Every structure is written in structure tokens, then in C-alpha cells.
Image: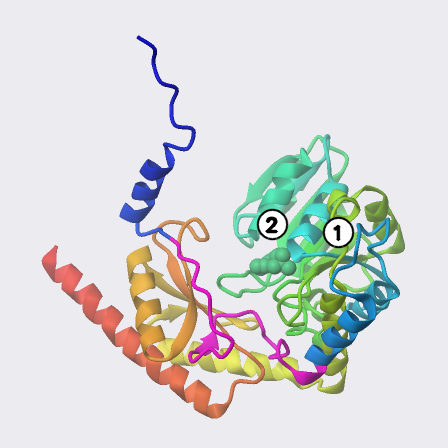
Amino acid sequence: MTTQPPEPFGWLDAHASARTEAGLRRRVQPREAHDPLLDLASNDYLGLCRDARVVAGAAEALRTWGAGSTGSRLVTGSTTLHAELEQALATLTGQPSALVFSSGYLANLGAVCALSGPGSLVVSDAHNHASIVDAARLSRARVVVVPHLDVTAVEATLAGRAEERALVVTDAVFSVDGELAPLVELADVCAAAGAGLLVDEAHALGVLGPGGAGAAAAAGLTARSGVVLTATLSKSLGAQGGAVLGSPDVIAHLVDSARPFIFDTGLAPSSAGAALASIGVLAAEPDRPARVRAAASHLHACALAAGFSATAPDAAVVGVRVGSPEAALAATVLLATLGVRVGCFRPPSVPDGVSRLRLTARADLTDDELALAGAALAAAGAAHAADQAARTSRR
Ligand code: PMP
């Protein structure tokens, strides 16, 4: 009797059932061009994604350069538009030089791997973004994950290392709860231990710092040697793409050795044109960062008034703790029926038992929209409290 080989992907069904049971199935939900829901879920913090000037910047680049960049950055994928964008990003963040990647994810992979590597140490905050987690794994460095925001643990890890080279990596503003990293303390600890500090400005660029320069600039770290920044062009700048910002030596090293820079097709010109136009709008309308921060504080107050527990926002993100993945999903669905779209974060994006709603503020939210958000949150808070009470009484 011949035995049949196993179905290669036969195990998928069992995995899908386990995820269904745990309330962890995910669905791709394409939105319409004109979304009827109030957007409190996107990362378009400055409200620039559909700004006419930004769209015109993309269209102009598209007409001039075509639909794609045609090659990797070191072959044909670098245009003068990319160079102009790199100059503008360096100026915006107060850094000497910049290098554009085709996403923020790839900027992190490129920077972390190129600045660490076998025989070195990477120290990473436990709440860092998945792109940093993946970058640390890919780096083949020894990786130590330290408790969230724990500068003492970073210091002890650096002090106890055998490796000569070390890189500490942190989100500037953490993506789920929106809290700021202790950047000055981290920079001091790194400087004393001869370690580099890489700060991911994804959720801080355009929101914090002078003119939206970011969290490192806000913390007075622009001139610090040993500090390197990464950023995405896909959040405040409303476009797509990523960047690494730092000294000319660091950027030259990345050009020579960062695999996501060397082997990936260059950023599409339309995205570069959009990001450049957004930087122009930010310079012309410097009140946008303060407006988004004020809107975030308002949303936080609404969440507290609705009975939720939520961290006071340091930037545009408000993390609202709900508990179980099912409760987070139920609140997200209810808010959608009330006209408000929020993010729903469940494991593996967050640890078990701390599923969250993620509300994001935008600089262009109107008073009416903020009032709608407040009313919907109040209803969701009441429904959540009633559900919790019913569960407790059944126990
Ligand atoms: N870093 C952080 C902190 C992020 O939140 C994100 C995007 N979610 C990225 C990096 C990746 O950026 P991109 O979407 O441009 O790849």
C-alpha cells in the first residue's frame, strides 16, 4: 500500500480555525473613494493625503518621470526628484543628509542591519514596531529586547555587553498607544556607552518638534553624533516611502551596504513628488502639527468621558484599552455603525488581554467631526460597560 504524501498546505485549515476560535481572524476591507465614515483610523495625521497641492505634486511628477522609477536606486531608480526630496527631508528634520527608501519598513530594515550585524548588539524596546523587530532578527546581531521605556535596562544591557559595537533602537512615538520614548535619556545612556541610537520618527514627523521636525528635534538631539533617524513618508506626509536621516558617513555606508536600498526598485516618482509637496505645505502652514495634537487631546478626553481607559497622547495617536479581542472588535463595529472608523489592535499586534482601539487625530478634523466622534465614543463606552457588567454577573 502506498501512503499519500500530505497536502502541502493542508495545515492551513487548522490554523485558521484556531485563529477563529481566538477571535483573531482578519478581513481585508477595501474602502470606497468617498468613505462615508469619519476617519479616525488612518495615519494621515496632517490631512495632506488628498490636499490639492500634494495631489498636484504627485501628478506633476507622474507626468515628468512616468509611473515608476524604472530601476534600483544605484542603477536608474534615482532621479533628481529623489535628490530634491532627500534634501527637503534633511532640512525638515535638521539632519545633515537623508536617503530615501521605498517604504518606512525597508528604511528600518536597511538602517538597523547596516548599522549592526554579526558580532554586534542590538537593544530594542519591547513595543517597537514590527519593522524594527524584523530588522533586528535579520541583522544577525545579538538582540536584547528590553522592557518598554526602560532606560535603566538599556543602560545595564549596554554596560554588560561583550560586543564592541551596539545599536539601541526605539520608536520615537509608539504606534499603538502613542506614547513618547525617553529620547534624551536614551541618547545620554548611548553616548556614555559608545552605542548608536536609532530613532524611528514614523509617528512623530510632522506632529512633534519645531515645524513638525520630529521627536529627536523636539528633544534637542539634532546635532548629537551617534543618533540616526528613520521615517516614513506615508503618515504625516500623506504619501508613500521611507527615509534614513543622519550624518553623511552613515548615509554613504547605507548606499554601499543597505540591501533594501541596493536591491529594491527606487521610490515611485509620484510618491516622491507628493512627499515633496507635503513638506512644502507643512512649511507654509506651520500650525498643522499643533492642530493635530489638539485634536488628539480632544479625542483622549472623549474616550475618558466615555469610561474607557486611555493613555494621554504625546502625538496624534490615542490608544484606548478595551481588553479582549472580541470586545475590541465589537466596539470597532459599533463605532462604524455610528459613522466612525477606528483601528482595532488585537494580538499579535498587541499582547494578549490588552486589545485596543486606536484612534488617530488629523489636523483637518472639524468641530462637527470631533462632536460626532465624542457622541459615538460615549455610545461605545456605554455598550462596553454593559457588556462587561453582563459578563461579570454570569461568572
Ligand atoms: N515604523 C513605524 C513605527 C510604523 O508605525 C510603520 C508603519 N506602520 C513603519 C515603520 C513602516 O512604515 P511604512 O508603512 O512606510 O512601511
Instruction: Provide residue 75's location: percent of width, then percent of height.
Output: 86, 49
The residue that disc 1 covers is 265
- Queried whether the magenta region covers residue 27, the answer comes back as yes
Quadrant in the picture for residue 16: top left
x and y, in percent, of residue 391 in the image: 16, 60
Residue found at x 56% / y 69%: 43
Task: Please name the residue shown 54% across and 64% down the image.
Answer: 179
Give the CA separation, mark 2 to mark 1: 19 Å
Q: Which residues are magenta?
A: 26-53
Quarter that holds the N terminus? top left
Residue visible at 82% across and 71% down?
64
Report whether 292 appears left or right of 72: left
User: In the shown orientation, is residue 354 left or right of residue 35?
Assistant: left
Secondary element type, mark 1: loop
Q: Mark 2 — residue?
A: 131
Q: Could you tell me if residue 115 is visible in this image? A: no
Q: How is the image coloured?
A: rainbow
Instruction: Farthest residue to the bottom: give it.
Output: 368
Which amino acid type is shown beneath numbered disc 2? Ser
